[in-house]
Structures are given as C-alpha cells and as structure tokens.
Image (spheres, grey):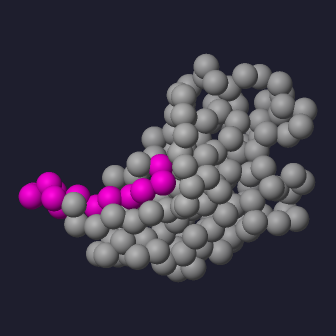
C-alpha cells in the first residue's frame, strides 16, 4: 500500500503489516485533490512505486521512482526522473513521474510530465532498468498549451503488451 511517502506491505491472509518503508523525508502537508493512484507494481521480488502524490502540475516530494525489496521493504534503488533525464530535454528539472509504474520484463515503464514556464503540459514515457533504475529511454508523447489540468481526468497507467506500450493521458495523447 503506497501512502505517498510511506509504503506498507500487508499480509493478505492475516491483514497484518509485514513491513513499512519511508520513501522520502519531509512533511506531506495539505494535498488537496490527488491526481494519481499511487499503486505498487510487484514482480521478481521487487515492489516498484512512485514517491509522493501528483497534483496537476507538480508532485509532492522529490518525484522519484522507487524499488523496494518485496520481502523486507529495503530500498534497492531510487531514481529522480529529472536527474536521470539530464540534458535529454529542456527544463528537465521540472519532470516528474505520475501514475503507477509497470514492470515489463527487465524494464520499468512510467509516465512523466513537466510543465513549462508557458504553462504547456508535456507528457513523456520513460523506461528504467528494473535492476538499477537507470534511464534507458525517454519518449515525448505530446503536449497541450495553457490548459488547466486540475479538473480533467486523473493521471493514467500505461499498458504494456507484446513489447508495446499503450498510453492515454490527460493532455490528449
């Protein structure tokens, strides 16, 4: 169960907490309307999730994708997409992940967004290594200029099937 800044593993039979892991330091504060379903993807002994909550044009916390050991909750790796993207895109410091990561083979697929100083919302699809969280590729999906995203449909989750990712986003992709 991802609560934004804390992930808990619950035994499905006893309903007792097996472990708890803090994803980031800091206060959560008043969130308002949270835009993404902070779910956890589990495969190959790893639990992969996104720290914080996406709220329209920002993400609480540092905007990291986090992989934890599914047995004990120890953190295997943390990747801040803005750092991993580096000079790949302009204004990468504003890039944040949203939705639920999808584990596909030895990769983690996650949606990302940045909002430019012109209020243009730009969506991306990122692929990380399941082993160490390094960025494999980043693909620009599309953008929309100057629209308010707060009242639009919530953030989405990509579907990966047959080596292809299928995406629907609130910017019209």
Residue positioned 85% across, 40% down in the render? 116
- Horizontally, residue 33 falls left or right of residue 16, namely right
Is 133 located above or below residue 138 in the figure? below
Residue positioned 90% across, 32% down in the render? 118
Is 31 located above or below residue 114 in the figure? above
Which quadrant of the structure image shows residue 93?
bottom right
- Horizontally, residue 111 falls left or right of residue 156, namely right
- Horizontally, residue 169 falls left or right of residue 113, namely left
Q: Nearer the viewer, residue 66 or 30?
A: 30
Residue lying at the far top of the rendered structure: 151
Residue 117 point in image, percent of width and height: 89, 37
Whether residue 11 is in magenta: the answer is yes
Residue 108 point in image, percent of width and height: 54, 65
- Horizontally, residue 88 falls left or right of residue 49, namely right
Q: What is the chief secondary structure element of the magenta stretch?
A: loop
Residue stretch rendered in magenta on the structure? 4-16
Q: Nearer the viewer, residue 106 or 70?
A: 70
Quarter that holds the C terminus: top right
Q: Nearer the viewer, residue 96 or 4?
A: 4
Residue 78 seen: yes
Residue 144 point in image, percent of width and height: 79, 30
Residue 102 seen: no
Q: Nearer the viewer, residue 152 or 34?
A: 34
Which quadrant of the structure image shows residue 115?
top right
Residue 75 point in image, percent of width and height: 46, 74
Whether residue 100 is in magenta: the answer is no
Question: How many numbered marks have been drawn onto this rendered protein structure?
Answer: 0
């Amino acid at each position: 169960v991802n609560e934004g800044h804390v992930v808990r593993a619950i035994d499905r039979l006893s309903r007792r907490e097996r472990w708890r892991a803090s994803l980031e330091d800091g206060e959560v504060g008043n969130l308002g309307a949270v835009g993404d379903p902070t779910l956890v993807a589990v495969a190959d002994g790893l639990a992969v999730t996104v720290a914080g909550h996406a709220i329209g044009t920002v993400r609480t916390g540092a905007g990291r994708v986090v992989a934890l050991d599914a047995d004990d909750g120890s953190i295997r790796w943390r990747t801040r997409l803005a750092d991993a993207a580096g000079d790949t895109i302009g204004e990468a410091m504003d890039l944040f992940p949203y939705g639920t990561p999808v584990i596909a083979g030895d990769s983690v697929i996650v949606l990302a967004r940045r909002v430019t100083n012109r209020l243009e919302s730009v969506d991306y699809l990122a692929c990380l290594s399941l082993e160490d969280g390094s960025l494999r590729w980043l693909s620009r999906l599309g953008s929309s200029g100057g629209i308010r995203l707060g009242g639009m449909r919530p953030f989405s989750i990509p579907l990966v099937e047959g080596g292809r990712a299928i995406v629907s986003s609130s910017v019209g992709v």
